[in-house]
Structures are given as C-alpha cells and as structure tokens.
Amino acid sequence: MNKCCSCKFHTWSDEFKKEKCEIEGCYEFSKYVEFDFYRDNRIPMKIIFLDIDGVLNYKDSKSRIYSFIGIDNKRVKLLKKIISMTNAKIVLCSSWKDDWSLNKEEQTEHGNYLDRKLRNEGLYILDKTKDNNSDRGHGIHKWINSRNVTNWIVLDDEIFDDYDEEIIKHLVKSSFYEDGLNEKLVDEAIKLLNKEK
C-alpha cells in the first residue's frame, strides 16, 4: 500500500481501492480515484506525451531545482490552458520520468518538485512511458497501443531518431533555445487534440 494523500490518512493499492477522503482539501486522493478510472484501458482518452526541458522551461529560465534549471510557472499555466480546452491527460515521456513514480515513496526530490509545480495549477501526471530515453518513440507507441487513445500529441523540443512519421504528425515542437511552450504552440496543441477523426 502506498500513501497518496497529503493528509496522510489514506492509501491506495494496485487493486485501486476506492473510498472518499473526508479530509477537506485532500486533493491528491481525489486524483488517485480518477487515476483508477483512466487506468482502465477501455476508457477513451486524449493524451499529452510531455517532455519537460525545453517545454516547461528554456535556456534563460530563472527557476531552479538545486543547480539545475527548474520549471517555469508561466509555462505550466500554458499547459493548463491546453488541458482545460481539451480534457487531455498527461503522460510523462521526458527523462524526468526517471525521477517520477506512481509510488511516491520511490520518487526523488526532482519528482516531488515536478508534482508540486503541476499541482499548483491543479494538474497531475497520469502515467509515464517505459523506454531507455534514447528510444522515446518506442515508449510512446507502446503506451498508445495499450490504451484507448483517441487523440494525442507529443510536446517535445527534440526529434529523436525513432520519432517516425506518425509521431512527427502529432509533434508540437518547442525550443529550449527560444522560449519553450508558448501561446502559438498552445493553439496548435489544442487544435490537434480536438481534431475530429
């Protein structure tokens, strides 16, 4: 069993135990209940495969996590705009996924920092891809093939060697050397995620 709540009174398990948290403001537990729903691979969903560096930050970002470039609040707000307009869910494909876990006891401080930054805007990560980071495209395809994904995008500042034609069609490419996620890319992302098939 893993702790899921800031109130410290609730836990969740692989059996996805569902119970209502009575602690006012216990945000995390309500989200784990939603996780249970969206982990059902029959449920239709829109997905944002999210990179972090070059998307939620860029070369001149002032935010820091220890000596590393952190996450910009402004760009998290732009991500929230995409999600608000599409009801898409976040799947982490960034190398930051090595620090992030569904089991918070296994998560590093970088993963905790990422969760806090997103949670400040009411956002959370549904899951992460499984790959060796160098074969990011493989991890994206593997995740899509295991779920009922209706529309999806990849928010990334890089084009990996295994980003095939299908991924390129869904790529919303930002730039680490310019400004990361911006309003123009937000509009592009919303259009792709809301596109009727």
Image (cartoon, grey):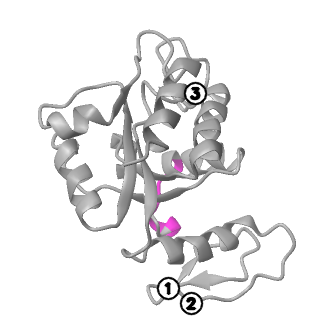
Q: Are marks 3 and 2 in contact (CB under 8 Å)?
A: no
Q: Nearer the viewer, residue 171 or 106?
A: 171
Type of the residue with mark 3: Arg
Whether the residues at callouts 1 and 3 have beta carbons within 8 Å, the answer is no
Please tell me whether the stretch drawn in magenta is mainly helix, strand or loop. Answer: helix
Give the amino acid at mark 1.
Ser
Q: Nearer the viewer, mark 1 or mark 3?
A: 1
Q: Position of residue 104 (x, y in %)?
A: 52, 66
Spatial CA span between label 1 and label 3 = 33 Å
Residue at the far front: name it: 197
* Tags 2 and 1 touching, CB below 8 Å: yes
Residue denoted by label 2: 17
Q: Does residue 3 sit above or below 197 in this rendering?
A: below
In this figure, which residue is indicated by the disc labeled 1? 13
Q: Mark 3 falls on what kind of element? A: strand
Sequence-earlier tag: 1 or 3: 1
Disc number lying in front (3 or 2): 2
Question: Which tag, 3 or 2, sits closer to the chain's start?
Answer: 2
- Helix, strand or loop at disc 2? loop
